[in-house]
Image: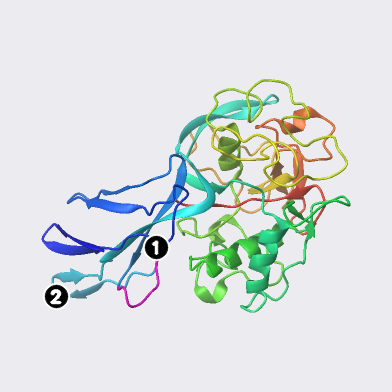
Amino acid sequence: MRAMKTAGMTLVLVLLLVLGASGEDPVIASFTENGVLAWSNATPGGAYSVEWSPSIEEGTWHNDWDSLSPVSATGSTTSVRVPLFYRVRQIPDMAVVPGGSFAMGYDYVAVRTVTVSAFVIDLNEITKAKWDEVRGWALTNGYSDLAVGQAGTGGDATSNHPVTMVSWHQSLKWCNARSEMSGLTPCYYTNSALLTSAIYRTGTVTVINDWVNWTSGGYRLPTDAEWEKAARGGLVSQLYPWGNAAPDATRANYNTNATTAVGNYPANGYGLFDMAGNVVDLCWDLYTVTMMPPEGSVDPRGPATTNEYGSTTRIGHGGSWSSTSTLLLKCSDRSYYIAPDSGGTYFGFRCVRNP
């Protein structure tokens, strides 16, 4: 622990208690008067969370501002209790996708430039083991109807294969459970008030854009734009996560009879595995052909309630073990449209969250 004088007050900065991938704790090195926090012992490409707490004794750490005490005003004086204690924690098994603009699109719809804010994303598709871990916690904490799910497909599938046979609705509830299990504010709610009493935990609710806490630090499905930016791995105008080279059996699991364990093929430029093949990744956005984000959009999230067909089908990306066409493996391909209440052996999901 170390104390630092900043803008006339003393800030006590709490250091990480859990080892990062480098084997050394991140160490908070400075907190400048203009609000820049710096730390050492960082792992290149690693995802980190800067968290705060009102007191060490409370033992609760936050990475969003929803938990700040309300502002009070007395006469001309306004005050709010601000965080005094900070720590830096490496987020395991996730990678940072830097914010910025990129050319989004595919062959038969005009390519357009969109901007996406920085986010972190799971290195792998959610495995059956991870699904079971969170589901076990969830069933005793208000999530009464999370599906059992299945380990991939095929006779050799084990718990390190991607979870399948879970629907879009189920994945949203699981994301919320993962958030609450981790002490984070959930993203998905059953109305636009975004109150704790309306956290989406049970039942079948078609959550719409206004019912999502987009500024929360919790886990959620990637948007269409986020997924495509992540899949490209920093490459520009390339067809696949690895570049323009034609897909083959050394690059992705496609046109086969079953899933493989996650991470079985080379990662892309952001360190992400299976962005092509294995299972299709469910995304947040409604599937649409004509209601695409316009040129210059910032953080597009798709149509608000239904698509041009009055449907609530959702976009799936990346192709799967069963894909016979390599076109489905393209970063920009969005040929999959999936009913939100259906499960299948060819699709699963991975999560993102705000950094």
Q: Are marks 1 and 2 in contact (CB under 8 Å)?
A: no
Numbered tag placed on residue 128 in the rendering: none
- Classify 34 as above or below 45: below
* Residue 202, image quadrant: bottom right
Q: What range is drawn magenta here? A: 55-66
The majority secondary structure of the magenta stretch comes to loop
Q: Nearer the viewer, mark 1 or mark 2?
A: 1
Residue 92 falls left or right of residue 7: right
Alpha carbon distance from label 1 to label 2: 42 Å
User: Which of 20 and 221 lies nearest the eye of the viewer?
Assistant: 20
Q: What is the quadrant of the N terminus in the image? A: bottom left
Circle 1 — which element? loop
Q: Residues within 10 Å of mark 2 (few under 14, many from 20)?
A: few
Three-letter code, disc 1? Leu
Q: Which residue is mark 1?
A: 17
Q: Which residue is mark 2?
A: 75
Q: Position of residue 142 (x, y in %)?
A: 63, 78
Q: Position of residue 218 (x, y in %)?
A: 51, 60
Residue 89 falls left or right of residue 137: left
Residue 119 falls left or right of residue 221: left
| Residue at 38% from the left image edge and 54% from the top image edge | 25
Residue 123 lies in the magenta stretch: no
* Residue 71, image quadrant: bottom left
Circle 2 — which element? loop
- Classify 49 as above or below 75: above
- Classify 243 as above or below 162: above
Q: Position of residue 168 (x, y in %)?
A: 71, 56
Q: Residues within 10 Å of mark 1 (few under 14, many from 20)?
A: few
| Residue at 72% from the left image edge and 69% from the top image edge | 146
| Residue at 45% from the left image edge and 52% from the top image edge | 20
